[in-house]
Image: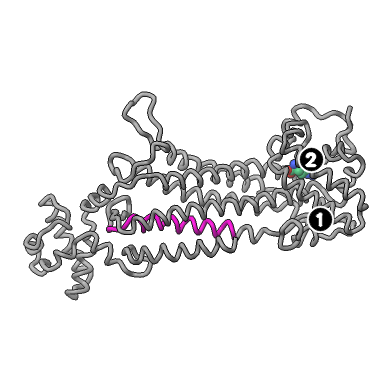
Amino acid sequence: MSQKIASARISAESSELLKELNNSLPFDRELYREDIRGSRAHARMLAQQGIISAEDFAAIDEGLKRVLEEIESGAFSLDGEDEDIHMAVERRLTELVGDAGKRLHTARSRNDQVAVDFRMYVLRKNEEISALLEALIESLLHKARQHSETLLPGMTHLQHAQPINLGYHLLAYASMFRRDWERFTESAERNRLSPLGCAALAGTPHPVDRRATSEALGFREPTLNCLDTVSDRDFALEILFNIATMMMHISRFSEELILWSSSEFSFVRLSDKHATGSSIMPQKKNPDIPELLRGKTGRAYGNLMSLLTVMKGLPLAYNKDTQEDKEGVFDSVRTAELSLRVLREMIDEMTVNEEAMEAACRRGHLAATDLADWLVREQGWPFRDAYHLVGKVVNYAEELGKDISELEERELAQVDPRLAEAQNLLDNRLCMNARRSEGGTATERTLEQIDKMQKWLLSVRSEG
Ligand code: ARG
């Protein structure tokens, strides 16, 4: 019987069921790059501090490079029986370089090892997701610029409310995705602290240099307190929360695309690439892609709840429960990356039906608020009186089977003679362009918002 590499006290071979429950290699192999990178930095530091010899370091460093190559070429398969990625890499290293490999784990525990690996992974994913968000925002800005004059009924309660333009609507989503970007970036900044050197829970008597490994691995500095660090998974919770919130935004957008591509709205046509047919109804073209994006939001929420629940009862410090931190994060990350790519492609390739959007603006009396505003502004009416008079105008228009924007002078005068001169104000485009207050929908304001967002995008890209 082979001696278990990670147990000095346990003699019996593990039960098959224990292995199935305990082994994390089937999923934490996702961390192989980070594990090897962390180990190389650790070994270098050990040599610099005189904890291992220069020869041992050279052997370990060469060996770890080989292990990496073997994993990437498939020569070393991570399908084996090793307990986790850390043990798999150490075992292969020791096979390759012999005794030097056995010195790698000096002044280290798998507790700080997994903490540093997972943190590096999460920090990398924060950046990759942020880059995908930048690309998505860029696409939205491009479309928004094309449609800063395309009329669209702005809604509240899913009822026609006031005329806006499509560019403005798309900018609302760009704004959400920018907040998401900020959250990923802030979270990465907050968590750019290195766990390495914390060892099992309380530090180590070896003269390690945590600042050296921290710097080598791209962290700002070492974490403050080892006891906290080995069981801290806030960085993982943060990316899960940030993904959940981002998926909520993606889901809201998807919901609108689903509505907009229905025959009731016909505001957009999704590219055939992003729609599927029905197995029974030959005429159907279904918006499966936005439906799936909306649906996948569920698992992103679930992964967040699941890790919050794993963490809630843990006494200090490391407990094996935290091994349950990874699969949900991997799943959320995969979901987020795919969703961002798909959403971007869908936006780039959808066709906008400007006539349908504009025609929809002639239903639902979108100009009603504008008429009341005119009475207030030009006639000095108290707003509440104006509001009630416009209510009468709307009722009258309904009787005539017209939209308020279609009423003629004499029809307006029927309700109140003073309204006749307001007739030319009830054009939806005029109403849209009248909303010139800061952050408003007027085309000039929309373009200003696009410019600001574009400037922001350029600035973060040049920093990155
Ligand atoms: N696979 C483990 C995890 O993901 C690594 C840490 C194991 N540490 C321990 N003390 N058993 O958490």
Residue 381 in picture, x, y percent from top left: 19, 73
| Camera-nearest label, 2 or 1 | 2
**Rendering colour mode:** one colour
Magenta highlight on residue 201 = no
Q: Is residue 129 above or below residue 328?
A: below
Say which label, 2 or 1, has the lower sequence index. 2
Label 1 residue SS: loop
* Residue 392 image-quadrant placement: bottom left
| Residue under label 1 | 197
Q: Which residues are magenta?
A: 162-185
Q: Amino acid at mark 2?
A: Val
Q: Please report contact status of discs 2 and 1: CB closer than 8 Å, yes or no.
A: no
Q: Is mark 2 within 8 Å of ligand 1?
A: no
Q: Quadrant of the N terminus?
A: top right
Residue 28 location, quadrant: top right
The residue drawn where x is 78% and y is 54% is 196
Q: Secondary structure at mark 2?
A: helix
Task: Residue 287: give x, y in percent of width and height.
Answer: 39, 37
Which kind of residue does numbered mark 1 sit on? Gly
- Left or right? Give the position of 434 relative to 62: left
- Crowdedness of circle 2 by 10 Å Cα count: few (<14), some, many (20+)? many
Q: Say left or right for 239 vs 6.
A: left
The image shows residue 375 at horizontal and vertical percentages of 18, 70
Note whether 372 is above or below 122 in the view shown: below
**Number of residue marks:** 2
Which residue is tagged 2? 67
Q: In the figure, is residue 146 to the left or right of 88?
A: left
Find the distance from the CA under tag 2 to the CA under tag 1: 23 Å
Name the image quarter holding residue 384: bottom left
Horizontal and vertical percent for residue 102?
Answer: 89, 43
